[in-house]
Image (cartoon, rainbow, N blue to C red):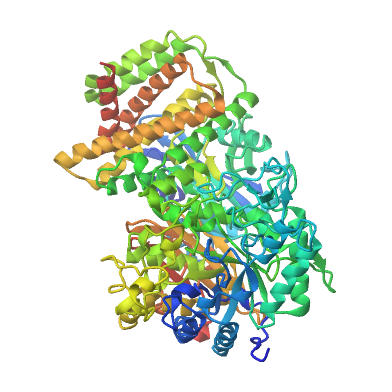
Amino acid sequence: MTTAMVLGDEPEWYRTAVFYEVLVRSFKDADGDGVGDFRGLTEKLDYLKWLGVDCLWVPPFFTSPLRDGGYDVSDYTGILPECGTVEDFQTFVAEAHARDIRVIIDFVMNHTSDAHPWFQASRADPDGEFGDFYVWSDTDELYEEARIIFVDTEPSNWTWDPVRQQYFWHRFFSHQPDLNFDNPLVHDAILDAMSFWLDMGIDGFRLDAVPYLYERPGTNGENLPETHAFLKKVRRFVDEHYPGRVLLCEANQWPADVVEYFGPESVVDEDGTEHIIGTECHMAFHFPVMPRIFMSVRREQRMPISEIMEQTPPIPEGCQWGVFLRNHDELTLEMVADEDRDYMWGEYAKDPRMKANIGIRRRLAPLLDNDANRMELFTALLLSLPGSPVLYYGDEIGMGDNIWLGDRDGVRTPMQWTPDRNAGFSAATPGRLHLPTIQDPVFGYQRVNVESQLDDASSLLQWTRRMIHARKQHACFGLGGFHDLGGSNPSVLSYVREYVGADGVTDTVLCVNNLSRFPQPVELDLRRWEGVVPIELLGGVRFPEIGELPYLLTLGGHSFYWIRLPDREGPDDT
Amino acid sequence: MTREEELHAYIAAARWFGGKDRAFSIGEVSDRELAPGVTTTLVEVTYDTGGTDRYQIPLSSYDEPAEHLEHALVGTWDGRWHYDAVHDHDAMHAWLHAFAGAEEDDGAFNGVPGHELDVTAQSALFSGEQSNSSVAFGEDSLMKLFRRISPGVNPDIEVHKVLTEAGSEHVAHLYGWVEVPASSGEPIHLAMLQQFLRTATEGWDFALTSVRNLFAEADLHPEEVGGDFAGEAHRLGVAVAEVHALLRDHFPTSPLDPDRTVAAMRQRLQDTIAIAPELAAVADAAHSAFDRISATTDGVAQRVHGDLHLGQTLRTSLGWKLVDFEGEPARPLADRMLPDSRWRDVAGMLRSFDYAARSVQRDLDVEDEARAQMDYRATEWVQRNRDAFLAGYAEASGPMSGSDLALIEAYELDKAVYEVAYEARNRPAWIDIPLAALARAREGSR
């Protein structure tokens, strides 16, 4: 593996990184076959570098019948032919690294496609090498406490296999049989597959659907101790052979349960100080915060966000949340109470086709009625709440969606680069594109595309870039504490991000967000910073000195401030 | 000027002074040492029309003018500069230390076990407080300094102590209080120290946010807009019911005397018509509602909040909290602690929903047709949130009987009458809000 180049010596790089989720098949098509590929993605690395992206998350591109966007893997060491070759992938990783951009890829370990040779062997020969690779049963009445996730399409978690004359277990689609993690051979096979990609120099994995690895009678089959034990095994394996690589866990659970996926363990250092360290995943997505941002803005009050932050427990040292507004999946509502879910559906999914399973399949811009102020406010929240932000390709230009496409394809349409044919995504005949480009009058590529926004200094793209770069100047966003200031006005969410660096220097940023469409005043209790002269972070404008009284700020509708709170100036400083 | 003249001028201009429209003179002024290095000053106010009140002004005295306290100057006398100590970080720090060192039944400062005070926290005076002064110590504790002082147990302290010890999640826990003996032997409560409720927003502001959100949509119903408050109103109903249950278990109860209750309501109505004659024209519904409760015999009187409305609630990230268990401030202290119907509190909250909607309507100040439309929509908002509040209350305390509902209605109209009197005295421009409520009740009962 000559191209396996690992990026610099920053073991906790992921705690300050800006992530960008990019669907290879929809980003850039270099060979004109209508499907995006790694050569195309490589061509666009300069753009991503310019935007300020630190790490790309590439959802599945493994060989697959593509009945679930590639999450149905039929070969863990092969690449979909239309995405390119293993050599193309290696070139892509090397070119990304050359630009200081890291790459993590999706890894689906819970299940495979039913087209995977392992499954074909397993159903054909129950006593063979792969006979126990999947969860087989003579009855479909086992594990009935486990909920059905894809309620729209799946009546049961068991499906009858006419070949083997047994039921097989699947937590997702019936064409995705779950692997049997009680079989140690499955562990070996999975670790081998991970090594294959780690040896190529990738910087880590996003582990798909990890809560469901094991199933046990009388449980809901989520977050079982056996599942955590296997993740610890994966972590030890990565730490030992591939230090500096990251495991990002997808566990759509409440924060208190998700924390378990960091594998918190207490250790005492030489000085006798106790530390809580992580022994499973380095990162985990914070699912509930995202729908609550939507709820807070719709309700014009901060409680939904304040509450979920209050309920978020501390995480072990060296760990980090991943936060996002939208991704390739639906806007998931599993993590909001029923009453709130009804409300979210009513508000954000006026057309029933916008609903998918327990969620809403829309992109950010259409969800926010293409309102520039709200898109900016949401992005500012994403970039300033605790965790590493994960942007979704196209949202930086305010791309739209196509709710008439099947499953979740409506938010996976080709990236809109130019106003030219196929949005500059592909030279193919338009009919050949694997998904049609967005053509409606509001979000169509003639109107919304990278090229025109590059030329427009006040575009969403330019604004997003400025914000990303501003965030990168301040370690407190990635590493600092979060302190909700509350405040007199329920429509204003104010918090302080604060980080004391190894050099003893404090980096403090006050974030004030008006969740309401109306102008709002807010009085903030900033006594801790009495005597400090706040400086607006983006423009460098000085604000009045903080005194004894509550600090009064006024905000326009859906506007926000990032304000630096530097140390008090000494008398000699002025 | 003399000390008395300075105090007179300071008190007359103070927000917390309750006798604004009355001429008065300064009577006895006494300095009390509460703990080593902590003193306060009690000032007797004698009204020309008769009656006295006693007010508390803790003083910080300096030999030189203290520039940073200029805004809090009470006056200069005896060659020294005297400031209102609630503004003075150093003085407040001394009070906090006295709380931290307090052991029960030993001196003026008393502590409630269960919380270690952060004595390093800096003080900050809350602005906007009406009848008392509140000083926050960092994000750890909050001291409420009572301004108008009367001998006798302070109901707010008494209730908070009980609810704190019962582990209620719906109040700020009590950490301590300051108490000195009066000449009569009764206690005089001067201040209380409570849990600081981080991230709190007043329920009133919270409700107004929802109303504004509703009015901003052209013609949607309250359940259709993003800012729907019904979920919150429901949770608030649960919180109030849970607090009522604890109060019933921990304080004496007695049968509710319907005749006395009705007599008091009728008296209030009659007195109010004297100062606001326009009330007479809309009073029939109140009369008949009062009649209906004469027949109720199964009512229970228990300890209640006594002055419950949205402004007495706080929404924190951890749910709803009730504050200020002092009872109706206009009533004599001893009366405020008498058992009363819990429906008085519930009715107060229902009236508050009406006030919330109508006050936003007032601020938006529209005319003619738009006004009628807004009126209609405000009524919808009020109805939805009343229903949700009552449903939440019933969910926690059990279903309401017919006589419960009759009591709620009577208390609600009685409260509206009280509001008419209050507005007539203090804010004549707002009198339409309770009058309109009474008029609507009259329409409804026809």
Q: Residue at x 57, y 54 (%)?
A: A173
**What is the quadrant of residue B246 in the picture?**
top right
With respect to residue B243, does A492 lie above or below?
below
Residue B87 drawn at (x, y percent):
51, 57
- Of the pair A452 and B158, the residue shown nearer to us: A452
In the displayed structure, A467 sits above or below B299; it is: below
> Number of numbered discs present?
0
Q: Which residue: 50% across, 29% down?
A: B393
- Toward the viewer: A91 or B316? A91
Residue B413 lies, with reference to residue A213, above or below; the image says above
Q: Quadrant of the N terminus of chain A?
A: bottom right
State left or right for residue A139 relative to residue A82. Answer: right
User: How far from the left and from the top, in percent, is residue B221?
Assistant: 31, 40
In this rendering, does residue A286 appear at all?
Answer: yes
* Residue B401: % across, % down: 48, 16
* As drawn, B369 above or below B138: above
Residue A488 in sight here: no
Horizontal side, residue A542 vs residue B341: left or right? left
Front one among A221 and A135: A135
Q: Position of residue B245 (x, y in %)?
A: 59, 27
